[in-house]
Image (spheres, grey):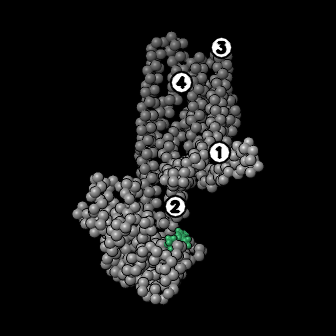
């Protein structure tokens, strides 16, 4: 936003800073409004704290680890029993040992106490160990299921889903699940078990005094309800804001080059500070609630202890209660509030897990909108005869068509140049040929096989696709060339590189073919990246080549190398080229001129020039100047 400066104020030079402040405030308001809009758009569900349908589905992941989980539950039960026995044992030691003056009995109960403590420690340790193993395995299973599933989804899905959101599913939601799986399955039961065990032990020891202790329960229920109702919103707000921060971090780092070139750093800092502050504010609210609840629980605990000591002490004085029982009940009261505190703390994990698993399952339930027909056959090795027969296509059902009744016949080995203005449908044609989308009308045949009747794998194995924005994977140059044919020998990799003229520059790299290309080939120049991608396509030896010629300009020497690489690549293969180079267009067997999804002219360079129609105009206005 431009700074608004009132000319009158500018004249006296005094009021300008005030105006600047107003404008900065307006900018800040605009940014805050944007944050709120993002929060509204955010798909973080508030989620139920407990959803039996989700729990059953999550439980399904436990099945392969059933024996381990059963052992963990047995261990958990044992450790709870050992733990609950502690205060009662101390009570017996006081009454039957100390007060009765029997050193033997005191020794006996002391040993029993020691044994139960060791028992509790060992069983707990084993349980935590087992559940950490099971939880980590389950989460690895879910992660790998998600990863596989994402590879099955079609490009339609990727056009509608942002990478940031996917990453937050794969990392954030799966992380929440890990926390839940390792702790909750037994931890939750342990807390409930403990609570029930303590109540029973107290009632058995002295039910009247137990009821005195439970007199604080209405207060506890009120506090817990207050907490429960508010904390969900508060934690949701912090999570949402954290996900905005993560999203912005992701985007800023990926786009750092653009940010620097447009010197947007300061704006980015301001926006990030706003996000950070918004997270801070939400966090302060969550902390305020925690500061209210947990000390509150402690206070109610002390209140219960005071009641028990007051009433119990009075009973002891009147000989209606032994001192040992009183001590045992006081110890139980203290322990009683631990599981409550733990359950309250875990309440958020529980609710976050429900929301996270809901989103993970939603993603896993998405069906790929393009699957092989049940009777799909592998496509035999083809000669490359491609027919578009009255093909129509719309990206989504109900959308307007982007290709209308298109007819095109490419004979084996022919070069087809697709030209037309932006948005004419050139990329759509090559996406249909690779069956990234299914045509909505007509048929598309290769060597007489309808591409919907063959398996996608067998189809794509015979296609070589070289796109404008060459994507190289982290690894060595050789790895990247070998990407489409893993069994290729080193000699074959080199031969492919030599054939496209890449061998020279590769050998000059510090580690030659073993040089790391960096993330998405960042260590190589644009032209070098293109050559590596040509070598990759050549090595895979496809029958049909799909090429989206790069528009980026390279120096004349590289241009010449690329040109001859392309000739090598296209030789003997049916090639569909979204052509930007004049030489590719002139050398094509057929030039297909597209306009708004229709073929408006078709023929060789000379034929089309002679017609003095659309191609002639394109050629004279656009292509000729690139010579
Ligand atoms: P350019 O030369 O700019 O790459 P193009 O000729 O390759 O353009 P296409 O990408 O095939 O054009 O686009 C044809 C039409 O289809 C355009 O109107 C475009 O808006 C639309 N389109 C492209 N991709 C999608 C998509 N994933 N979902 C919906 N519509 C799309």
Spatial CA distance of label 3 from label 1 is 50 Å
Number of the front mark, 3 or 4: 4
In the displayed structure, 203 sits above or below 562; it is above
Circle nearer the N terminus (1, 2): 1
Circle nearer the N terminus (3, 4): 4
Spatial CA distance of label 2 from label 3 is 67 Å
Circle nearer the N terminus (4, 2): 4
Q: In which quarter of the image is residue 306?
A: top right
Whether the residues at callouts 1 and 4 have beta carbons within 8 Å, the answer is: no
Return the residue at label 3.
Answer: 317
Residue 427 rendering spot, x and y as whole percentages: 48, 72
Number of the front mark, 3 or 1: 1
Residue drawn at the location 54% of the way across and 20% of the way down: 91
Residue 59 appears in the rendering: no
User: Badge 2 local density, few (<14 within 10 Å), some, or many (20+)?
Assistant: few
Number of the front mark, 1 or 2: 1
Return the residue at label 1.
Answer: 233
């Amino acid at each position: 936003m431009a700074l608004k400066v009132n000319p009158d104020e500018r004249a006296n030079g005094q009021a300008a800073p005030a105006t600047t402040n107003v404008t900065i405030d307006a900018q800040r308001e605009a940014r805050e409004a944007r944050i709120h809009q993002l929060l509204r758009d955010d798909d973080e569900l508030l989620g139920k704290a407990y959803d039996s349908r989700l729990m059953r589905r999550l439980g399904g992941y436990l099945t392969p680890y059933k024996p381990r989980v059963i052992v963990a539950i047995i261990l958990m039960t044992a450790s709870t029993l050992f733990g609950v026995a502690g205060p009662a044992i101390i009570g017996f030691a006081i009454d039957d040992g100390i007060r009765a003056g029997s050193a033997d009995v005191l020794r006996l109960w002391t040993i029993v106490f020691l044994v139960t403590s060791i028992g509790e420690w060992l069983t707990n340790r084993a349980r935590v160990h087992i559940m950490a193993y099971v939880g980590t395995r389950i989460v690895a299973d879910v992660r790998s299921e998600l990863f596989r599933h994402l590879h099955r989804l079609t490009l339609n899905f990727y056009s509608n889903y942002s990478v940031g959101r996917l990453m937050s599913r794969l990392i954030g939601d799966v992380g929440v699940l890990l926390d839940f799986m390792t702790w909750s399955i037994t931890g939750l039961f342990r807390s409930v078990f403990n609570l029930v065990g303590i109540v029973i032990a107290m009632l058995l020891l002295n039910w009247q005094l137990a009821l005195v202790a439970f007199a604080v329960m209405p207060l506890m229920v009120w506090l817990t309800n207050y907490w429960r109702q508010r904390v969900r919103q508060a934690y949701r707000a912090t999570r949402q804001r954290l996900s905005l921060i993560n999203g912005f971090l992701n985007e800023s780092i990926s786009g750092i080059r653009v940010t620097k070139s447009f010197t947007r750093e300061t704006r980015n800092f301001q926006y990030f500070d706003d996000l950070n502050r918004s997270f801070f504010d939400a966090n302060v609210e969550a902390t305020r609630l925690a500061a209210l609840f947990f000390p509150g629980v402690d206070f109610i605990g002390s209140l219960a202890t005071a009641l028990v000591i007051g009433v119990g002490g009075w009973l002891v004085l009147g000989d209606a209660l032994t001192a040992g029982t009183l001590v045992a009940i006081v110890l139980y009261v203290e322990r009683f509030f631990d599981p409550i505190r733990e359950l309250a703390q875990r309440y958020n994990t529980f609710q976050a897990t429900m929301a996270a698993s809901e989103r993970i399952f939603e993603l896993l339930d998405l069906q790929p909108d393009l699957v092989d027909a049940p009777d799909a056959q592998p496509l035999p090795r083809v000669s490359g005869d491609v027919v578009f027969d009255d093909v129509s296509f719309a990206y989504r059902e109900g959308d307007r068509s982007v290709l209308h009744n298109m007819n095109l016949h490419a004979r084996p080995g022919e070069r087809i140049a697709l030209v037309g203005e932006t948005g004419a449908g050139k990329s759509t044609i090559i996406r249909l040929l690779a069956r990234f989308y299914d045509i909505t009308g007509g048929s598309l045949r290769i060597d007489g096989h309808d591409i919907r009747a063959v398996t996608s794998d067998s189809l794509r194995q015979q296609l070589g696709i070289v796109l404008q924005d060459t994507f190289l994977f982290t690894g060595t140059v050789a790895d990247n060339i070998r990407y489409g044919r893993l069994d290729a020998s080193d000699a074959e990799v080199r031969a492919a590189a030599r054939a496209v003229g890449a061998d020279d520059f590769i050998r000059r790299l510090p580690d030659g073919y073993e040089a790391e290309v960096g993330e998405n080939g960042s260590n190589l120049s644009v032209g070098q990246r293109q050559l590596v991608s040509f070598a990759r396509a050549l090595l895979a030896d496809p029958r049909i080549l799909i090429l989206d010629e790069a528009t980026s300009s390279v120096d004349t020497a590289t241009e010449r190398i690329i040109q001859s690489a392309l000739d090598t690549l296209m030789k003997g293969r049916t090639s569909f080229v979204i052509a930007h180079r004049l030489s590719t267009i002139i050398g094509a067997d057929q030039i297909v001129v597209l306009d708004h999804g229709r073929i408006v002219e078709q023929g060789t360079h000379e034929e089309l020039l002679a017609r003095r129609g659309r191609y002639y105009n394109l050629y004279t206005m656009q292509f000729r100047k690139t010579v």
